[in-house]
Amino acid sequence: MSSPPPGFDRRTACPVCGGTQTSRLYTAVHSDEPVRSLIASNFGMQGVIDWSLLEGAPYEVDKCATCDLIFQARVPNDAMLEVVYTKMISAAFLEEYERGLLTLAEFHRIAGEFTTLFEAIGKHPADITMLDFGVGQGRWARVARAMGATVYVTEIGDDKKRLARTLGLEVIEDEAIDAMTFDLVHTEQVLEHLVHPGRDFARLARAVAPGGVFKAAIPYRGKLETLLTSKGLPTVAMFASGGAKTIPGEAESFAAIMPLEHLNAFSDATVAWMVAANGLKEISHVRRRSISVGTGGPKALLAGASRVGVELVKAAARPRIGYHLLRRL
């Protein structure tokens, strides 16, 4: 029996809580404006868009009255997801993009965050097991492994799996998660991509070992509902050339519901619903990180002091930016 061709499935209930009290916020067609231009500006520089697969396909955004999730009602099926994450976002593009982010500054940023996460777990790094759910090109996972943790990863696409193995990461199939536990379950900009976010969040919550933590970093949706109903979608994506400048102050909100890719836009209320439903407790909504200070001279000390100052301001302001650190009750 052959697999179904690339296409779309319809989510008839909220994919987080299963609620059926939903309202339609926005409707259009993937192959028509403004959705077509938005898709072109986002994926055109990343890979190849086969517009025949999108012709006439509805783009519909709903909101759940129970858990406050905003979500795309029409989502890519498994074959279409393979097209999105291997063709429309090509391995070559990702490799070049991620290579550009392998900087000392990025290493310090990620290592500083893992330092605080490992301290929250309270184990020696060599004794910590971590699941990086949706590892991508391994920017986060490779740092955690370098710090001593044993890192298990999942991903779509053979290219990403092969890369993960070359980095010394333990590649597992998605279903293996259900029989394992981890000290740290790590999701960085992943949950918004899932067709079944409620189901998979519950699976990940069950995979948190006693004393472990669950990090969920997701796009901040801001005033997305108001923007969708009053302005509709923009024609330029946030990460396209000039995208954030074209729609200043609103780019991140629209990015939370990017066609084909960001299928779910979570609010604090949505996360609170998932946390309560899965026996978790939120222990922070602010990214915390240790800051390294160079001792190579006055300039290095000044730069380090500046970084410390920025983190202190963030800690004092306690901004809500779509970051949630959770612990099992």
Image (cartoon, rainbow, N blue to C red):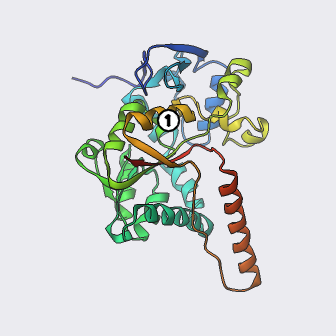
In the image, residue 290 above or below residue 230: below
Q: For this rendering, which residue is in front, 19 or 45?
A: 19
Quadrant location of the N terminus? top left
Q: Is residue 235 left or right of residue 93?
A: right
* Res 218 quadrant in image: top right
Query: As shown in the figure, which amino acid type bears the numbered disc 1?
Result: Ala
In the image, residue 187 above or below residue 68: below
Q: Is residue 277 left or right of residue 109?
A: left
Query: Neighbour class for label 1 at 10 Å: few (<14), some, many (≥20)?
Result: some
SS state under label 1: helix
Q: For this rendering, which residue is in front, 139 or 224?
A: 224
Q: Is residue 295 visible?
A: yes
Q: Is residue 185 visible?
A: no
Q: For this rendering, which residue is in front, 283 or 303?
A: 283
Q: Position of residue 303 (x, y in %)?
A: 73, 73
Q: Residue at x 38, y 57 (%)?
A: 164
Residue occupied by mark 1:
272
Number of dots carrying numbers: 1
Q: Residue at x 58, y 30 (%)?
A: 257
Q: Position of residue 47 (x, y in %)?
A: 54, 41
Q: Residue at x 25, y 46 (%)?
A: 176
Q: Position of residue 108 (x, y in %)?
A: 58, 68
